[in-house]
């Protein structure tokens, strides 16, 4: 692993130029002010008499409150709510033929990374489970400088040109006059905007699919979205799209679960990631590339520079070339997850941009935003942002919060101070960052290329490639979202656009809204039927597994120890974690007389935070639970959320009260613990009644 220069909070960190500075030391010892004065009393401010006013001269108090008053920095304008982790990237297959970037050519080398996942629309304190796109931003501390792959969990985007981004974000965020809704696209302004921007329809299909309500950050795919370029030794370019594939597979919540989890645990995703890493269950992703030559790109039935389009895997397969493992939680949320700053323009030699007009705008935006967020052009010196795999030397100097103490006189170049025996400073190298050699032609103009005009064919491709269940969910999501839209003509315009995506979908949504179906809007380009791409599905794309998931066991006093142990070991052997839920947090006494500790009390630990549940109950407890609304709801919700339910015979009164039909996903756990675990790896989709 590349050696870190900014290490533990108690060490001395080396910064640019080899100087050192002290990082915050939070270890034991005497409490001091920020300037090292020992503090004698951290409980009482300095007063004139025991009941008198506080004295202005109390510099200990004033320093403490002054610092506290300025603890917050502006939150990100988008992607404010995020969770981060450290990790390591290892290349498994060299791309030497296409690039000179060491991160993509040195097989087996481990490179440190920092990853930040995020929602887009909500503020920093908003919930983890809204319907939203998730950010998937990876910082690789490569030997050739930082590479930031700032992507999402959806491979396309709403708009084609950066100039529309502020409009999109204004439309989706809280409405300007009322300051709500927070973290929700289900409101007038968002749908008004997207209904007027048919280019957003492909992304809308993804955003209304279950991809936008992931079960955990660990179970998401990631995409670089734009076409980038790889440059070989001769600077010959190949287009590339980047992909992350979760080794634990893709999994989403149901909408009803997402809504309920928002209330039960607003930190559901953050907690899941933190606990998984703390428990040694390191999430892993395969890293893949789709490579396309200029000649092949020209033959694609869409423009590779258009970020509202994806390259179907059936057309260009995703080649797996590396692996990312998240193996360390941040020591300090603010210092790392909040202050990490990504730049799509952070590209090591051998990786280059494309002319995608959305990417081009991002190359400017991210650098700019860091100045208002982090307040200084020296934000690259914040440890989480500092290059680690290589030196950082140049003649940039001074600025607010300059941490480096540069030596010597050479703060300009060229200079000849070396001839005088002084340090002349660093020099450029031909091996550094180089751009593709590309002839740029065309008159200066503000136009949208005609090759970007087809807004519907891939939206249709996505919808028609989904399983029936996923199509049902998309229709239901559209009905839900549009039902929150008060302006009727906006709903009508969305329906008119949906007609071009799929008339049967448009009809279903219109019926769900109880609104007449308008005729289709006029597409700018002919909509074509593309061959379906099963790789776009969520359900069934990866093998079903319970690994990394969580099973909740509702246990009562007098429950059979052996059955509890059986379920636990079957689930744990398959890689799941187990949580014991009991009526009170005090736990239970099992049949053998042994005490069993509780991980959560029944009312505060609802079944919808689990992937599967089991009921290990004594007969009298099952009867008592049947008269307990919280217990009945616990079981009924698990059933309605299509989960596997492991049961013992004695649980019958509770199951009956909760209207649980004994289908194949309701399994006798005492007799068939393995069958339970197998069923727990997926949902019983046939239980679901299509909501519209
Ligand atoms: Fe961003 N985006 N974005 N974005 N974006 C930001 O940068 C922006 C876009 C994405 O965890 C901001 O440092 C513009 C696409 C992620 O810190 C800001 C445009 C994709 C993150 C910004 C886009 C993304 C951001 C806010 C259109 C997927 C969070 C704070 C041209 C490929 C990174 C910041 C983190 C954050 C601007 C479009 C992903 C304002 C102008 C497309 C994952 O600079």
Image: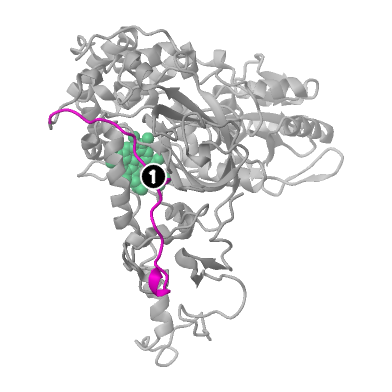
Q: Is residue 441 magenta?
A: yes
Disc 1 secondary structure class: loop
Task: Name the foreground residue: 432 vs 587.
Answer: 432
Start and end of the magenta stretch? 418-443
Task: Report the side of 499 relative to 621 (left or right).
Answer: left
167 inside magenta stretch: no
Residue at the right extreme, as displayed = 592
How many labels were placed on the picture? Answer: 1
Can residue 460 be seen here?
yes
Picture coordinates of residue 61, whole percent (x, y): 42, 80
Percent from the top left, x then y, of residue 77?
31, 47
Horizontal arrangement in the rendering, residue 585 relative to residue 292 (left or right): right
Q: Is residue 138 above or below residue 368?
A: above
Q: Residue furthest bottom?
A: 49
- Residue at screen point 48% across, 39% down: 101
Using the image, determine if residue 370 lies above or below residue 187.
Answer: below
Give residue 490's quadrant in the image.
top left
Residue at position x 45%, y 13% in the image: 533
The image shows residue 296 at horizontal and vertical percentages of 38, 16
Quarter of the rendered image showing ligand 1: top left
Residue 122 visible, this angle: no
Q: Which residue is mark 1?
A: 433
- Residue 493 falls left or right of residue 578: left
Label 1: few (<14), some (14–19) or many (≥20) C-alpha neighbours in 10 Å: some
Q: Nearer the viewer, residue 381 or 274?
A: 381
Q: Which residue is drawn at the image coordinates 29% and 56% (left, top)?
A: 372
**If the image is split into quadrants, where does the C terminus sit?**
top left
């Amino acid at each position: 692993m590349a050696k870190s220069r900014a290490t533990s909070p108690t060490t001395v960190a080396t910064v640019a130029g080899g100087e050192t500075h002290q990082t915050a030391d939070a270890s034991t010892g005497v409490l001091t002010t920020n300037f090292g004065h020992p503090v004698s009393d951290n409980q009482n401010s300095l007063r004139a008499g025991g009941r008198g006013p506080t004295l202005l001269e109390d510099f200990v108090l004033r320093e403490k409150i002054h610092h506290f008053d300025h603890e917050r920095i502006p939150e990100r304008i988008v992607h404010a709510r995020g969770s981060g982790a450290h990790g390591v990237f290892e290349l498994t297959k060299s791309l030497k033929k296409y690039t000179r970037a060491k991160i993509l050519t040195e097989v087996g080398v481990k490179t440190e990374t920092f990853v930040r996942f995020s929602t887009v629309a909500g503020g920093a304190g908003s919930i983890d489970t809204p319907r939203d796109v998730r950010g998937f931003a990876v910082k690789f501390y490569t030997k050739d400088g930082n590479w930031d792959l700032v992507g999402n969990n959806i491979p396309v985007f709403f708009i084609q040109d950066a100039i529309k981004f502020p409009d999109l974000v204004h439309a989706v965020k809280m409405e300007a006059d009322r300051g709500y809704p927070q973290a929700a696209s289900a409101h007038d302004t968002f749908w008004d905007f997207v209904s007027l921007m048919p280019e957003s329809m492909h992304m809308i299909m993804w955003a209304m699919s279950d991809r936008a309500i992931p079960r955990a950050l660990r179970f998401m795919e990631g995409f670089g979205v734009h076409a980038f370029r790889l440059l070989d030794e001769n600077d010959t370019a190949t287009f590339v799209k980047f992909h992350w594939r979760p080794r634990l597979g893709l999994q989403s919540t149901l909408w009803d679960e997402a809504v309920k989890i928002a209330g039960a645990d607003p930190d559901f995703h953050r907690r899941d990631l933190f606990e998984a890493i703390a428990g040694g269950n390191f999430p892993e992703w395969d890293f893949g590339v789709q490579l396309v030559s200029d000649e092949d790109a020209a033959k694609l039935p869409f423009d590779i520079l258009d970020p509202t389009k994806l390259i179907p895997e059936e057309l260009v397969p995703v080649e797996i070339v590396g692996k990312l493992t998240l193996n360390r939680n941040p020591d300090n949320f603010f210092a790392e997850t909040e202050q990490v700053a990504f730049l799509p323009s952070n590209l090591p030699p051998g990786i280059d941009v494309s002319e995608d007009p959305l990417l081009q705008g991002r190359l400017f935006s991210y650098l700019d935003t860091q100045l208002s967020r982090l307040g200084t052009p020296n934000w690259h010196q914040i440890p989480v942002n500092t290059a680690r795999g290589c030196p950082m030397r140049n003649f940039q100097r001074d600025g607010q919060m300059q941490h480096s103490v540069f030596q010597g006189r050479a703060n300009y170049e060229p200079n000849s101070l070396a001839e005088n025996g002084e340090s002349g400073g660093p020099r450029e190298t031909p091996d550094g960052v180089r751009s593709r050699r590309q002839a740029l032609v065309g008159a200066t103009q503000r136009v949208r290329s005609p090759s970007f005009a087809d807004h519907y064919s891939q939206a249709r491709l996505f919808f028609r490639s989904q399983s029936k269940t996923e199509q049902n969910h998309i229709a239901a999501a559209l009905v839900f979202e549009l039902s929150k839209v008060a302006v009727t003509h906006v709903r009508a315009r969305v329906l008119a656009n949906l007609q071009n995506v799929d008339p049967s979908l448009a009809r279903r949504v219109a019926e769900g809204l109880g609104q007449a179906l308008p005729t289709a809007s006029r597409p700018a380009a002919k909509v074509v039927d593309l061959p379906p791409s099963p790789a776009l599905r969520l359900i069934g794309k990866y093998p079903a597994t319970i690994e990394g998931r969580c099973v909740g066991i509702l246990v009562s006093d007098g429950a059979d120890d052996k059955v509890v142990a059986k379920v636990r070991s079957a689930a744990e052997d398959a890689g799941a974690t187990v949580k014991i839920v009991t009526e009170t947090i005090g736990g239970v006494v099992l049949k053998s007389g042994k005490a069993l500790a509780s991980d959560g009390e029944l009312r505060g630990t609802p079944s919808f935070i689990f992937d599967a549940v089991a009921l290990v109950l004594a007969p009298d407890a099952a009867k008592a639970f049947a008269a307990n609304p919280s217990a009945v709801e616990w079981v009924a919700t698990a059933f309605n959320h299509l989960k596997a339910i492991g049961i013992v015979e004695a649980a019958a009164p509770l199951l009956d009260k909760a209207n649980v039909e004994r289908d194949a996903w309701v399994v006798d756990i005492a007799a068939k613990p393995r069958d339970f675990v197998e069923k727990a790896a997926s949902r019983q989709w046939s239980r679901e009644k299509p909501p519209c």
